[in-house]
Image (cartoon, rainbow, N blue to C red):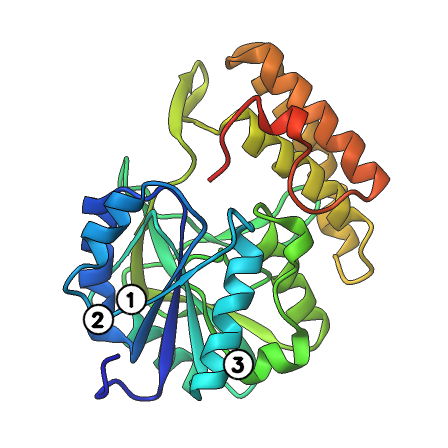
């Protein structure tokens, strides 16, 4: 733990089959900014993990197998409560915060009386493209981009990695939905926080690099290409969006403009981007399981067809 960081923030870093070099760089960037770093390890690449945390002052909480992103985050939240921290910073192993990211996020939260969480402007590490913050609209969302002057944007949801959350807000809103396992965990919690009357702040001068998906595939008419995910990840993406459709706190506008996105993904990954057959089977099974209300880890039949991070 780093005693001088105030107010007390615990960074919750979920790992699964981590790359040791990348994880070490993330820890070096993160540790000077927070009071504690908790590595919540879901398994895999044990040697890489050991090398990354050696000689670095972090708490390691091994999970009983791959319990999923949300369940690991909840274990970290419980740890932070017991240790007396007031805020938690959620992080994925594929992110790299700027040296002043946490300070800027904390300043934005402290300046607002209604915010549950604040998130950074993240840059895709592959092409340097800055992602916008989003307000839900119809037929498409409103993408709000940061200008050079910085500033703070009220968003309808924040990505999970880099999100700084007040534990007092979690006490009201509740923990992450462990049943979702991995995808759309941040989206569902954001919608729940907004329904409870909280704001979510996008902080333009807080910066973070982040890797989206496994790769990008370039297609005609799509200058930035398409973010590619494994078949198993596509299962969770499809299943969990249907699960969200059923929830009362999820905005109906988001549901209305997300349904066409399902059709686009079915076409892209079932017809254009391989492995097409496997992608299509996993996506259709995800939609079916979502319609049935199935939660938790993917069925073994689906899990055997791909790898989820």
Which residue is denoted by mark 2 in the rendering? 57
Label 1: state its secondary structure.
Answer: loop
Q: Which sits in the foreground, 78 or 257?
A: 78
| Residue 22 vertical placement versus 4 (above, below) | above
| Residue 154 vertical placement versus 80 (above, below) | above
In this view, the residue farthest toward the left is 55
| Residue 213 vertical placement versus 97 (above, below) | above
Residue 30: which numbered mark, if any? Answer: none
Q: Which sits in the foreground, 103 or 156?
A: 103
Which residue is denoted by mark 1 in the rendering? 149
What residue is rendered at 80% in x and 56% in y?
247
What residue is rendered at 67% in x and 81% in y?
172
Q: Marks 2 and 1: which is nearer the front? A: 2
Q: Which badge, 2 or 1, comes first in the chain's sequence?
A: 2
Report how far apart the C-alphas of labels 3 and 1 lie in the structure.
Answer: 30 Å
Q: Marks 2 and 3: which is nearer the front? A: 2
């Amino acid at each position: 733990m780093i005693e001088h960081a105030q107010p007390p923030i615990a960074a919750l870093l979920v790992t699964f089959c981590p790359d040791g070099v990348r994880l070490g760089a993330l820890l070096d960037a993160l540790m000077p900014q927070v009071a504690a770093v908790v590595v919540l390890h879901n398994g895999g690449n044990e040697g890489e993990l050991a090398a990354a945390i050696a000689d670095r002052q972090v708490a390691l909480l091994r999970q009983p197998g791959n319990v999923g992103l949300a369940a690991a985050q909840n274990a970290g939240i419980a740890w932070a409560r017991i240790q007396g921290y007031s805020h938690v910073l959620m992080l994925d192993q594929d992110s790299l915060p700027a040296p002043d990211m946490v300070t800027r996020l904390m300043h934005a939260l402290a300046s607002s009386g209604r915010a549950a969480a604040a998130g950074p402007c993240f840059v895709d590490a592959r092409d340097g493209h800055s992602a916008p913050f989003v307000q839900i609209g119809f037929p498409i969302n409103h993408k709000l981009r940061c200008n050079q002057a910085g500033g703070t944007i009220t968003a309808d949801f924040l990505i999970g990695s880099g999100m700084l959350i007040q534990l007092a807000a979690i006490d009201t809103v509740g923990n992450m939905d462990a049943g979702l396992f991995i995808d759309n965990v941040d989206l569902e919690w954001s919608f729940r926080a907004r329904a409870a009357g909280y704001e979510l702040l996008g902080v333009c001068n807080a910066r973070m690099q982040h890797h989206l998906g496994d790769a990008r595939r370039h297609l005609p008419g799509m200058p930035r290409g398409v973010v590619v995910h494994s078949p198993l990840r596509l299962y969770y993406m499809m299943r969990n969006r249907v699960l969200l459709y059923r929830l009362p706190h999820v905005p109906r506008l988001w549901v209305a403009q997300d349904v066409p996105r399902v059709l686009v993904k079915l076409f892209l990954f079932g017809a254009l981007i391989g492995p097409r057959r496997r992608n299509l089977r996993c996506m259709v099974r995800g939609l079916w399981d979502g319609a049935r209300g199935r939660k938790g880890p993917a069925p073994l039949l689906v899990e055997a067809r791909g790898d989820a991070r």
